Amino acid sequence: MNDNLVPPVEEKKKPNTMLIVGIVLIVLCCCLVVVGGGGYWLWENGDALLGLG
């Protein structure tokens, strides 16, 4: 018989921490742009929107 059988070694997966952090930062930046743009639009057009101007 063959006594030199070694079970296959599973490679450990590297966590993609930097990829996850990058995606989260991009999503947060997009949210900031949307909120900032909406806030600017409301600042400029809020009176007309509410019928005050």
Image (cartoon, grey):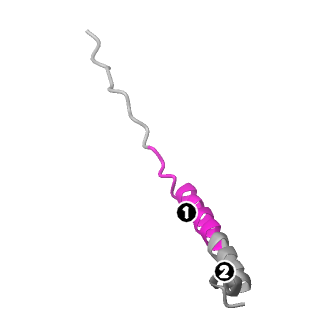
- Magenta residues (range): 13-32
Residue 27: in magenta span:
yes
Residue visible at 33% across and 25% down in the picture? 6
In the figure, is residue 15 to the left or right of 43? left
Q: Please provide percent x and percent y for residue 35.
A: 62, 74
Q: Which residue is mark 1?
A: 24
Main secondary structure of the magenta stretch: helix
- Quarter holding the N terminus is top left
For mark 2, does the 10 Å Cα neighbourhood hold few (<14), some (14 to 19), or many (20 or more) residues? few
Q: Nearer the viewer, residue 35 or 49?
A: 49
Residue visible at 69% across and 74% down in the picture? 37
Instruction: Say which element carries label 1.
Output: helix
Q: Please provide percent x and percent y for residue 33.
A: 67, 71
Instruction: Say which element carries label 2.
Output: helix
Residue visible at 55% across and 63% down in the picture? 24
In the figure, is residue 5 to the left or right of 24? left
Q: Please provide percent x and percent y for residue 38.
A: 66, 75
Q: Nearer the viewer, residue 6 or 28?
A: 28
Q: Which residue is mark 2?
A: 49
Q: Are marks 1 and 2 in contact (CB under 8 Å)?
A: no
- Quarter holding the C terminus is bottom right
Q: Nearer the viewer, residue 30 or 18?
A: 30
For mark 1, does the 10 Å Cα neighbourhood hold few (<14), some (14 to 19), or many (20 or more) residues? few
Q: Is residue 32 above or below residue 8?
A: below
Cα–Cα span, label 1 and label 2: 34 Å
Instruction: Specify the amino acid type for callout 2.
Output: Leu
Residue 21: in magenta span:
yes
Mark with earlier residue (1, 2): 1
Q: Please provide percent x and percent y for residue 30.
A: 64, 66
Instruction: Specify the amino acid type for callout 1.
Output: Val
